[in-house]
Amino acid sequence: MSDNVEKYIKRKVYKSTNSRIAQKFVDAGLEKLRACINCGTCTGGCPSGRRTAYRTRSVLRRALTGDESVLEDIGIWFCSTCYTCYERCPRGIPVTDMIIKLRNIAVEEGHILDPHFVLANKVFYVTGHGVPANGEGNQKWRDLRESYGLPPLPPTVHMHPEAVKECQELMKSVGFRDLLDKIEKQKEKEKLEAEKAEANKIEDKKKEKEKK
Amino acid sequence: MSKNSKWKYGFFLGCVAPNRYPMIEASIRAVFDHLGAEILELEGASCCPAPGVFRAFHIPTWLVIAARNLTIAEELGIDVVTGCNGCYGTLRDAWVELNHEPELKKMINEHLAKIGREFKGSIEPKHVVQVLYQDLGIEYLRGFVKHKFKDLKVAVHYGCHIIKPSDKRPWGGEYEDPTFLDEIIEITGAKSINYKDKFQCCGAGGAVRTAVKEISADFSREKLENIRDAGADIIIDCCPFCHLQLDLGQMEANNFYKDIIGEPYKIPVIYVTQLLGLAFGIDPNLLGLMKNHDLQQVPPFISLEPFLEKVKNQLT
């Protein structure tokens, strides 16, 4: 075998998988993505891609080639997880599950939208429900239940405070509480920095005016 | 009716049905009771947790909380039934994954041990529609039909997670064109009409509704347009979150997209057990079809009156 051929065979095709995010992908079992032939069937059947700039194939390509900006791309939150791409992929890649794992990596890096963070931190962690009916602001929902002959609260975590504690115990155990705390701190810091930047801007404008 | 012990389920409520659309919960209870299928409460169950959000945030959290919910039914030794596609997706996916991956199961059980629980995998999570179609069966259901609807055109909306991912669902791998829900609907005499992109997502799931409501409402706008074009009298669904998206979302689409939709949408949205119950001769009050309160800003946001008016004479 000539040197050239040997070089060609041994060349590092997936050079970019050495990048940090690509490594995280591999750790998360996403190496299946390497089977992707970029046919775009996932994008073609995507109901979100019909109305937004979200492109499934492109997002996964960017992730696999180590383009970290994909983690901050709001587009990855436009997937409605309908699983059409998962079913149709001719290479058998569990595409939707890959998007979900990509989102996990994004969240771990602190890239989570505010409404999602509030839902996790202030609603689900606190009540055990994603959509609760307890508490002061939710009287009308309890009244609505009663109007259909049901007890004001369902026999879920809402009727069992010890069950809420069990859920919180589990979320601590798997590291979710720590993750939420980390993100909360990060969000506070970002907020302060933004406020500071805003204040500086106003200050600069003032100075400019004075100069004139 | 005597209780048949082979049909006994732990009722997994989830969040949207009990806490926002309780008429759905009421109708499932009424229809199961009528059919002699016993329902037991899963005391202390939590959010499933919702796959589009919590699974997307942190998979281990999603898995361990789903496993905890399943252990509540395991203690009772009965299968779980849920009326929600999202809950079904979570419970079924978690159940399949934990049963197929011993390492994962071991890891999850180490966490569960801290609250004195253990996931065994001994019971199966099922959907209300799955129980109706596979456990009870079409022929059994047919025997209960007292009133047949005439000239009622129905747009059936399956939603996504009752069908997909198909390798974790009980429909023999069918995902492009299943018929089980249409078959159930049609025993009532209603006609399931075909419409463009029937199996398209409603747009609520996957954290999209929570993230950007306008995008989510554009999914439902497209669905509603296709349903209206096909001349449907009502929409029938089998998921409270789709139900919310098609009912409340109809108002949102009317608002966000008023310049492009022409006439505002006003298609009544009805849950599968509400329609079945009517055909079985169950009191509409028990099926959550009658509004019996003065509460403001509560569902149904799209009036059911045109539907009730249409079928009134067929129910005697």
Image (cartoon, grey):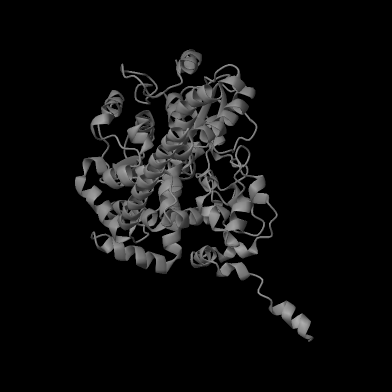
Residue at x-position 58% and y-position 39%: B179
Q: Is residue B271 above or below residue B44?
A: above
B300 sits to left or right of B3: right
B297 sits to left or right of A35: left
Q: Position of residue B148 (x, y in %)?
A: 51, 22
Q: Quadrant of the N terminus of chain A?
A: bottom right
Q: Is residue B78 visible?
A: no
Residue at x-position 56% and y-position 48%: A83
In the image, farthest residue toward the bottom: A1
Q: Position of residue B172 (x, y in %)?
A: 57, 51
A167 sits to left or right of A59: left
Q: Is residue B232 visible?
A: yes
B95 sits to left or right of A68: left
Identify the image quadrant of residue B186.
top right
Q: Nearer the viewer, residue A76 or B243?
A: A76
Q: Is residue A28 above or below residue B280?
A: below
Across the whole image, how many numbered discs are drawn on residues? 0
Q: Is residue B27 above or below residue B104?
A: above
Q: Nearer the viewer, residue A95 or A103?
A: A103
In the image, farthest residue toward the right: A2
Q: Position of residue A22 (x, y in %)?
A: 54, 64
Q: Position of residue B20 (x, y in %)?
A: 36, 31
